[in-house]
Amino acid sequence: MASTTKSVYYYALGRRKSSTARVRIMSGKGDIKVNGKTANDYFCGSKFLLNKLNTPFLTVDMLGKFDVFAKVNGGGHNSQIEAISLGVAKALIVYNPDFKSTLKRADLLGRDPREKERKKFGFKSARKQRQFTKR
């Protein structure tokens, strides 16, 4: 928890694949800013992605009570949304530790560890080998 001259904000870090999101939430009207733009502009108005962004707030019944400021880099839109969502869930726990059990039951606190597998020497990609010919 950090304090500025205006108001108190709650900070958390969320990661997914190669995306990293630094998220601050503070009491407000429900505005979401991502890298200085509104979430609707940043994610090109995709309803599916914007619904994923509100999932932590819907779970704890706090939709529209916090403003979200996120700085995110790396990855694509989907992994960025999931990183921001994890950051929001963690920040809500900093705000109120009683939310932890609710968010954990909704599977919003686990970091998804799946990453892209590296290409191996002698293979065409991570696991694809050259075609085998018997004769």
Image: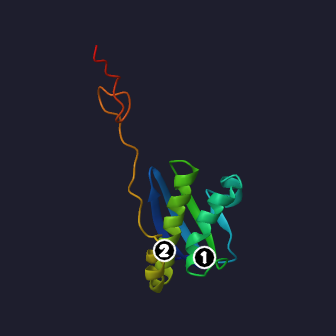
Judging by the rendered image, the residue that carries numbered circle 1 is: 58
Query: Where, by quadrant of the figure, is residue 126 drawn?
Result: top left
Q: Which amino acid, by three-letter code, is at mark 1? A: Leu
Query: Where, by quadrant of the figure, is residue 28 drawn?
Result: bottom right
> Do we see residue 26 in this rendering?
yes
Dot label at residue 28: none
Residue 58 position, x and y percent, is 60, 76
Residue 80 position, x and y percent, is 54, 55
Judging by the rendered image, the residue that carries numbered circle 2 is: 106
Q: CA distance from mark 1 to mark 2?
A: 11 Å
Of badges 1 and 2, the one in the foreground is 2
- Image point (46%, 70%), residue name: 107
- Image point (28%, 17%), residue name: 134
Query: Where, by quadrant of the figure, is residue 104 drawn?
Result: bottom left
Q: Which amino acid, by three-letter code, is at mark 2? A: Ala
- Image point (52%, 60%), residue name: 82
Q: Is residue 5 left or right of residue 124?
A: right
10 Å crowding of disc 1: few (<14), some (14-19), many (20+): few
- The total of numbered circles placed on residues is 2
Q: Is residue 88 left or right of residue 17?
A: right
